[in-house]
Image (tube, rainbow, N blue to C red):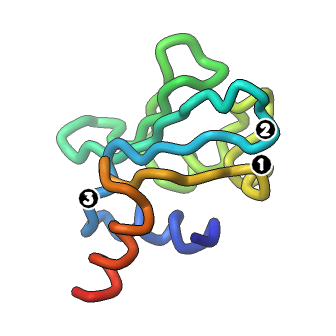
Amino acid sequence: MAFDQLLFLFQSKHCAIDETAFYFSDDPSETDHFIGYLPQYEKPYWIGLCDMEGGCEFLTAEELFYAKVFDGKSLKDRWDAVVLFQIGGIDVDVWMELYENR
């Protein structure tokens, strides 16, 4: 999945994108990181397991994707190393198949 595709999903808010998980291929420990969208909160976009203890929250998808909270870099900055493995708690390949067939 391309950066712009995932950003679009977060911007569109019509897909189940909470608990989206990834790791960085250049991280030898392959630590899982999580991003999501929870519409019931004032700042609905969130990142877990980042440079900020306890994660962080944002008003917009753009803020989330461009926040420099992964070793001082953003998701956009590190996109070439992102290995996305779950969207909305579902395996990426399964999710993509379901999304394309709707």
The residue singled out by tag 1 in the image is 78
Give residue 16's mark. Answer: 3
Rendered image quadrant of residue 72:
top right
Residue drawn at the location 30% of the way across and 63% of the way down: 13
Count the marks.
3
Say which of marks 3 and 2 sits in front.
Answer: 3
* Cβ atoms at labels 3 and 2 below 8 Å apart: no
Q: Alpha carbon of mark 3 to alpha carbon of mark 1: how far?
A: 24 Å
Give residue 69's mark. Answer: none
Say which amino acid is labelled 3.
Ala
Residue 79 position within the rendered picture, expressed as x and y whole percent measured from the top left? 73, 55
In the picture, measured across the screen, residue 63 lies left or right of residue 71, that is left
Judge the density around disc 3: few (<14), some (14-19), many (≥20) Cα neighbours within 10 Å.
some
The residue singled out by tag 2 in the image is 73
Q: Alpha carbon of mark 3 to alpha carbon of mark 2: how far?
A: 26 Å
- Work out whether residue 63 or residue 96 is closer to the camera in this orientation and state it: 96
Say which of marks 1 and 2 sits in front.
Answer: 1
Say which amino acid is labelled 2.
Lys
Q: Alpha carbon of mark 1 to alpha carbon of mark 2: how far?
A: 7 Å
In the picture, measured across the screen, residue 17 lies left or right of residue 85, that is left
* Cβ atoms at labels 1 and 2 below 8 Å apart: yes
